Amino acid sequence: MSENNESVFPEPPLAGDETATLLGSLERQRATLAWKCGGLDAAGLRATIGTSTVSLGGLLKHLACVEDTHFARLLLARKPGAPWDAVDWDADPDWEWRTAAEDTPEQLTALWRGAVERSRAVVAEALADGGPGHIGRYTTSSGESPSLRRVLIDMIEEYARHIGHADLIRESVDGLVGEDPPR
């Protein structure tokens, strides 16, 4: 994670079309997480608040898992790759949260950034094949399949929920507060 503002902090367009607004919102959430987790050592990424076991490193690993499983599974019906494919999720449903403390900041950052890049490629593929209305290949037990639009909204919500956690944890580590880095 970069401690500096990698050029301009991403903002969705004020009056963009649906695709630009959805993608811009997701990129802003991703950038906020990167900023909240940036510049910390292993101890900072392992820090928790109160009785919670949620850490910034755990958030990075969890969101890498969600990035790698959500888009590829719902839009392309692909099974996740490493490291997710080797986990017995029934036996260890909190694996990504538990094992994040064993990873270095560099490993966590690379895992999350790699997952984001793979998700961007899946989204580009889906956009080229129908835009936000592209229907994913995954089918629920009731026979429904999600649109790209729905998957993007779900991912924006996932990030927004966890950025609230990141705000509190990061403030407890070193006092960093705010919604986005100074410009």
Image (spheres, rainbow, N blue to C red):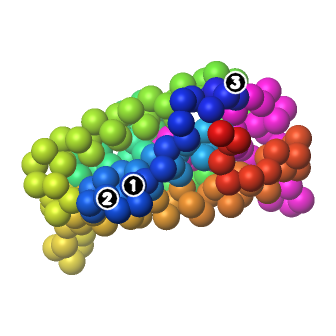
Kindly identify which residue carries mark 1.
13
Mark 1 burial class by Cα count in 10 Å: few <14, some 14-19, many 20+: some
Name the residue located 69 percent from the left edge and 24 percent from the top edge: 104
Q: Earlier in the sequence, mark 2 or mark 3?
A: 2
Kindly identify which residue carries mark 3.
104
Amino acid type of the residue tagged 3 in the rendering: Thr
Q: In the rendered view, tell whether residue 68 sits above or below residue 26.
A: above
Region of the chain picked out in magenta, as a range = 36-65
Question: What is the quadrant of residue 33 in the picture?
Answer: top right
Asked if the residues shown at circle 3 and circle 1 are in contact, with their CB atoms under 8 angstroms apart, the answer is no
Q: In the rendered view, tell whether residue 105 sits above or below residue 122.
A: above
Q: Earlier in the sequence, mark 3 or mark 1?
A: 1
The residues bearing labels 2 and 3 have C-alpha atoms spaced at a distance of 39 Å
**How many circles with numbers are drawn on the protein?**
3
Residue 107 within the segment the image draws in magenta? no
Amino acid type of the residue tagged 1 in the rendering: Pro
Name the residue located 18 percent from the left edge and 48 percent from the top edge: 126
The residues bearing labels 3 and 1 have C-alpha atoms spaced at a distance of 35 Å
- Judge depth for marks 2 and 3 and give the one in front: 2
Q: In the rendered view, tell whether residue 137 sits above or below residue 40.
A: below
Mark 3 burial class by Cα count in 10 Å: few <14, some 14-19, many 20+: some
Kindly identify which residue carries mark 2.
16
